[in-house]
Structure formats: structure tokens, C-alpha cells
Amino acid sequence: MSKEEVGVKRFSKKESSSRIGRIPTPTGYAGLGDINSYLIFPEQPGDELILIDTGICSDEAWQALNDGLAELDLRVEDIDRILLTHGHTDHYGQAQRIHELSNCQLWAHENLWLTNERMRPPPERKEIELYFYALWGVDRALADKAISRRAKIADRYHPMEPDHLLKDDEIVAIPGFDLKTIHTPGHCPDEVVYWQEELKVFFSGDHLLPNITPVCLTQMPRKIGDVRPRALSEYQDSLAKVSPYPARVTYPSHGAPITDHLELIKSYGLSTDRRLLKISRILEAGGPMTPMAVGKELFPRAWEEQIVPVMSEIIGHCDILEDKGHLVETEKKGVIEYHYRSMPAPS
Ligand SMILES: [Zn+2]
Ligand SMILES: [Zn+2]
């Protein structure tokens, strides 16, 4: 199924449910392609039309959303409620613009503010961010570049105040199509997966993606000295949380529907194991090393342009290695160093 073309689609009953539609819109992010918004069609005429995720705030995405709705005989004005899987720009970006035409509600997880704050931090946060970049061995010029790149990304969405904040396990009542909210932090702190029990269907946001392993973005604490959330470890827990569900189809935010989410989770496990091994080898040969030094070796082509995902990958995997006793982390003069202890065995 993963080779299927991902276009505007009204899914058939045979595929899962005729109540589900999909509209992909371009994100403009290199390597990411489109983001899928999903529609939940009303059971009865006059019931709510629901949109899961909005697309990024750009004229191209706006046009694609309008064209996609028109293909399904709908208009932006018909949307009654937006459900977010999480607050990243490609999922949340057009919410305000849709709201202005439709007066729709916005429902999102209660941690949405954390992702918002990360994207548009208050000025005083810059010092904290620079402190952490320095702690990881990232030089000042590269840190400044990352901060200014983020400011550009933040222009791609207009945050909209949510009307309702969802909690883990909360049921979103939709006639004939109730959705259970499963909080799955890891990719970001407000990520949720929606579960439709009768159809055995997931809307997985960026938690489960075919073709790419979701990046678990490192969360800098809000204050120096606060404990840093361990994003990749949280992500592993969130994978364990969705594993037991007997999903027939998983609708991801990027790419084609997934028919075997357990197989996908298994493949994530293998690539995590491989990366843990590679990092351990780098540290064994060259350690002690800063997170940045490990990043340069592991991602020789990407580190300069993609410092945030690169640091996230290194720090996330080193958290796991540290938790399992394979490395020790020390801090000297405000810079972290990883010290090799032992090689992880493949699980
Ligand atoms: Zn995302
Ligand atoms: Zn996304």
C-alpha cells in the first residue's frame, strides 16, 4: 500500500470507511513533501464536518486545501471543527485562516502551548537556548543560525487559540465516529494519535510514519537547571502505548496509509538499535566527545544545515545509552562530554 499515490481521496467502505477523506497539501519542506489532512464526513446531513490537521500557512497549501475540498464537493466554510494531532507548522499552520472563513472550533492536546512556545519563544528564552547549544558543544554561529531559521519557520503559521484542550484517553464525541485521544509524546510534547474503535483505525499524526522515522526533537528545559525531558525515550514509551491496538489501517500525516503498524514499529526498533551501535563505535574510537562532535561524525553531510534534528538524534540516543549504562555523561566548563563504557547488544 505504501507505493499507492497519495492524492485527494474519499476512502471506500472496503478500504476502511466511507466517512474518511484525505487532502494532501504541500509543506514546502525539502524531503518531507505533502502533509495529509483527513476529513471525517458527517453521518447525517447537518452533522459536523471535521478536519484533522490543516496544512502549513502558505498560498500553495491554501490553494491545495480549497481544491481538495472542491473535489469532495465541500468548501472551507463547511468545516465545523479542527482536531490537531500536534502543533507543528504543517499541521496547525492554516487553522486561523480556516477559522476566519468557517468560524470552526479548534481542539488540541493540552500541551499545545509547549510546542507553540518552542516555535515562538519569548525574548528572554534566547539566553537559555544559547546556554544549551553551548552545553552540547554547538558553536555560537551555528546556534544563531538555528534560531534564525526557526523564526522563518514560525512565519509559516498563525497560531489560533484552542477552544478545547484534550487530555490523554479523552473521547472526542463524533456521531457514529467517536475518537479516543492517545497522548503519544516523543516527536513533540503535544503529539496525539486518534483511535476509532469500531473501524480499528488510527490517525497517527507524525507518531507513525511510513518511509521516514519521526525525529524526536530535543526539548530544552524552560529554566536552566530543570530536568530535560528525554524525548526519544518518551517516544519509545509512546510506541509501546499504541502497539497493543488492533489497528487495521493507520492514517499517517505524511505518506500513504499503513496496514501493519506493528511491522513498522519493529523496523523503527531495528534502526534505533543500529544507531545506538554506531554512536557507541564512534565513542569507543574517538571519545570522550561532545554531542556536537558525535553529530559531525554520524551525520557528516547534514550537521551543518540541520543542527536541530542532528542534535536531537544524538542526544536522544545517548540518553538511552546512558540509561542502559553504555556511556557516562560528564559536564566540564559548561560543555557535555560522553564517555564510552560498553557496546550495546542488539535487542
Ligand atoms: Zn511534526
Ligand atoms: Zn508533520
Image (cartoon, grey):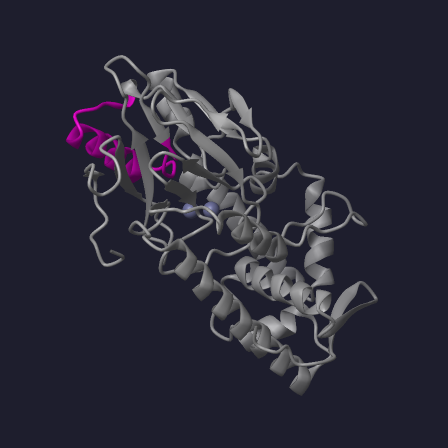
Camera-side residue of 127 and 260: 260
Task: Give percent across and percent down for residue 264.
Answer: 41, 60
Question: Up-down: is 189 above or below 273?
Answer: above
Quadrant of the snapshot with the N terminus: bottom left
Q: Which of 265 and 187 is in front in this view?
A: 265
Q: In the rendered view, does 153 fall on the left or right side of 344?
A: left
Q: Position of residue 68 (x, y in %)?
A: 21, 34
Seen in the image, is 285 located left or right of residue 6? right
Residue that appears at 36% across and 38% down: 55
Rendered image quadrant of residue 62: top left
71 versus 320 height, above or below: above
The residues colored magenta run 52-76
Q: At which x and y percent is residue 344?
A: 64, 77
Residue 310: image quadrant is bottom right
> Does 70 lie within the magenta span?
yes
Q: Where is residue 85 in the image (x, y as percent from the top left)?
A: 46, 38
Give whichever of 335, 33 is nearer the camera. Answer: 33
The answer to whether residue 217 is seen in the rendering is: no
